[in-house]
């Protein structure tokens, strides 16, 4: 059975980012997490990582669409 929650070090590895970048995502609210245990270690639910990735894809698509529209004002349409 796969774990429901994983530590930030695993999140960082999954996203190919540093541990400090993973922590920054949590602190900014971009990635939801919980603090557990007496030392308050951060844990992220695996489904939250998938949601974050989907939101990132959508945000990237929006950015690319805006860049294309700025480069070619006569072109309108989707990605």
Image: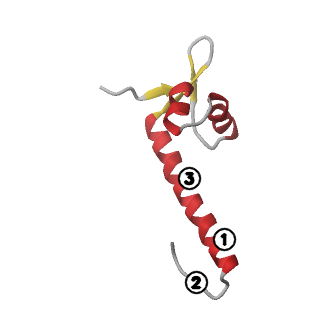
Identify the image quadrant of residue 47: top left
Q: How many residues crowd mark 1 within 10 Å: few (<14), some (14–19), many (20+)?
A: few
Could you tell me residue 8's position as x and y percent?
A: 56, 27
Q: Earlier in the sequence, mark 1 or mark 3?
A: 3
Q: Label 2 to label 3, Cα distance in Å?
A: 22 Å
The residue wearing badge 1 is 67
Q: Label 1 to label 3, Cα distance in Å?
A: 16 Å
Q: How many residues crowd mark 2 within 10 Å: few (<14), some (14–19), many (20+)?
A: few
The residue wearing badge 3 is 56
Could you tell me residue 14's position as x and y percent?
A: 49, 35
Identify the image quadrant of residue 76: bottom right
Could you tell me residue 58's position as x and y percent?
A: 54, 60
The local secondary structure at tag 2 comes to loop
Q: Residue at x 62, y 12 (%)?
A: 39
Q: Residue at x 52, y 31 (%)?
A: 13
Identify the image quadrant of residue 70: bottom right
Q: Earlier in the sequence, mark 2 or mark 3?
A: 3
Asked if residue 78 lies left or right of residue 71, the reply is: left
Q: Nearer the viewer, mark 2 or mark 1?
A: 1
Could you tell me residue 29's position as x and y percent?
A: 65, 41
- The chosen color scheme is secondary structure
The residue wearing badge 2 is 76
Q: Residue at x 64, y 88 (%)?
A: 74
Quadrant, the N terminus: top left
The local secondary structure at tag 3 comes to helix
Q: Are marks 2 and 3 in contact (CB under 8 Å)?
A: no
Q: How many residues crowd mark 3 within 10 Å: few (<14), some (14–19), many (20+)?
A: few
Q: Earlier in the sequence, mark 2 or mark 1?
A: 1
Q: Are marks 1 and 3 in contact (CB under 8 Å)?
A: no
Q: Label 2 to label 1, Cα distance in Å?
A: 12 Å
């Amino acid at each position: 059975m796969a774990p429901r929650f994983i530590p930030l070090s695993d999140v960082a590895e999954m996203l190919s980012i540093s541990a400090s970048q993973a922590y920054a995502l949590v602190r900014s609210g971009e990635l939801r997490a919980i603090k557990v245990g007496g030392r308050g270690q951060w844990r992220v639910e695996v489904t939250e990582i998938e949601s974050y990735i989907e939101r990132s894809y959508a945000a990237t698509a929006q950015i690319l669409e805006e860049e294309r529209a700025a480069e070619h004002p006569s072109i309108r349409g989707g990605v």
